[in-house]
Image: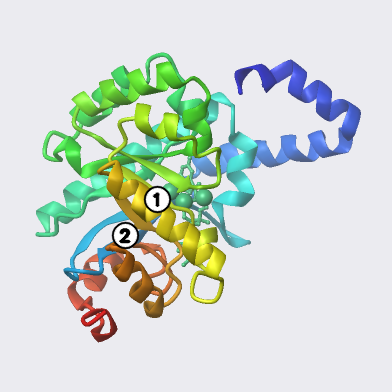
Amino acid sequence: IAKLNGKNRSHMFDIVNERHIRENHTLLTRVLKAYEQNEFQLYYQPKVNMHTGEVIGAEALIRWIHPQQGMIPPDVFLPLVENTEFSVTLGEWVMRQALEQMGKWSTAGLVLPVSINISGYHLQQADFVRRLAKVLNEFPQVPSDWLELEILETTAMEDLDRIAQLLDDCMKLGVHFALDDFGTGYSSLTYLRRLPTQTMKIDRSFVIDMLSNSMDHALVAGIVGLGKSLEREVIAEGVESLEHGIPLLRMGCYLAQGYGIARPMSADKVQEWVAQWQMPAIWRNY
Ligand code: C2E
Ligand code: MG
Ligand code: MG
Ligand code: MG
């Protein structure tokens, strides 16, 4: 990634489309300004255990609440900051926000582990572990094992030895790791074996159509089986309806996240959501 950065990358863009760069440049400036003006906010999407009915945690998802344009999703602005120093600033902001929020919830009687998404560039900073430790220390009331870091399979591929060591060091601090969007990268079994991640998140592209598409159903079953053999937790993303839970439960995939359970919501709505959440009847006798 670092190699594609800076010069070579903008050179590539130069050739392709100069206007494109200028537009991206102004967009990036706007993103930096938005950060200074506090326009970013974390939304939280609950994760549940469909077997026990418990709410097991939430994923923090960044939102840009633009004063005129309203909510701008991360896919629109994160690519602009990817591979820039600012992605580290933003990544640490996300960490602090999530830890602070867990502290607030816990004070209010809700223990809710939160996972945050870590960009490849951020993870590859030489002082990642030291800085993570520092941020964790700022929140002594929040146990570090409430924090989970979601990394993309493709990030984990970059330099296996280094990443494996890095994960190991982070795990010594207590934090958990999940391989996000599992199945969309190379999914090499070697990587899976070498990386000490506790959780695999099955990418939503396999889950969404699994009720109608037998190939997707088979792939999800395969990933669930793989996770079991390797003693990893497996969570299905993209559970867009409660019905999705039935084949997942049959496969032994108990953990789920998706619009069918809850949409990402602002932090102030989470406690109420958790309080009203009940295991749907449809999951009881799968
Ligand atoms: P992700 O980590 O795979 O997050 C899950 C995405 O799927 C979220 O999109 C979520 O809103 C969406 N989703 C959840 N349930 C469903 C469902 O049932 N159906 C469908 N179609 N989609 C569902 P979102 O919030 O737009 O985020 C997109 C991506 O942006 C994330 O994918 C993640 O890679 C990245 N991202 C979000 N927040 C952060 C952040 O704070 N830092 C970093 N580095 N990346 C982030
Ligand atoms: Mg994620
Ligand atoms: Mg994902
Ligand atoms: Mg994704």
Sooner in the amino-acid sequence: mark 1 or mark 2: 1
Q: Nearer the viewer, mark 1 or mark 2?
A: 1
Query: In which quadrant is the C terminus drawn?
Result: bottom left
Left or right, 30 with respect to 219, comes to right
Say which residue label 1 marks.
201
Where in the figure is residue 52, as x and y percent of width and height?
A: 16, 68
Where in the figure is residue 14, as x and y percent of width and height?
A: 86, 26
Badge 1 local density, few (<14 within 10 Å), some, or many (20+)?
many
The part of the image, by quadrant, that contains residue 160 is: top left
Left or right, 275 with respect to 211, comes to left
Asked if residue 210 can be seen in this view, the reply is: yes
The part of the image, by quadrant, that contains residue 265 is: bottom left
Q: Is mark 1 within 8 Å of ligand 3?
A: yes
Residue at x 49%, y 75% (from the top left corner): 211
Q: Given the image, on which type of amino acid does mark 2 rest?
A: Ala
Q: Nearer the viewer, residue 269 or 251?
A: 251
Marks 1 and 2, how far apart at CA? 22 Å
The part of the image, by quadrant, that contains residue 73 is: bottom right
Where in the figure is residue 62, as x and y percent of width and height?
A: 46, 50
Disc 1 is placed on an element classified as strand
Residue at x 41%, y 66% (from the top left corner): 258
Circles 1, 2 touching at the beta carbon (< 8 Å) = no
Say which residue label 2 marks.
267
Q: Given the image, on which type of amino acid does mark 1 rest?
A: Lys
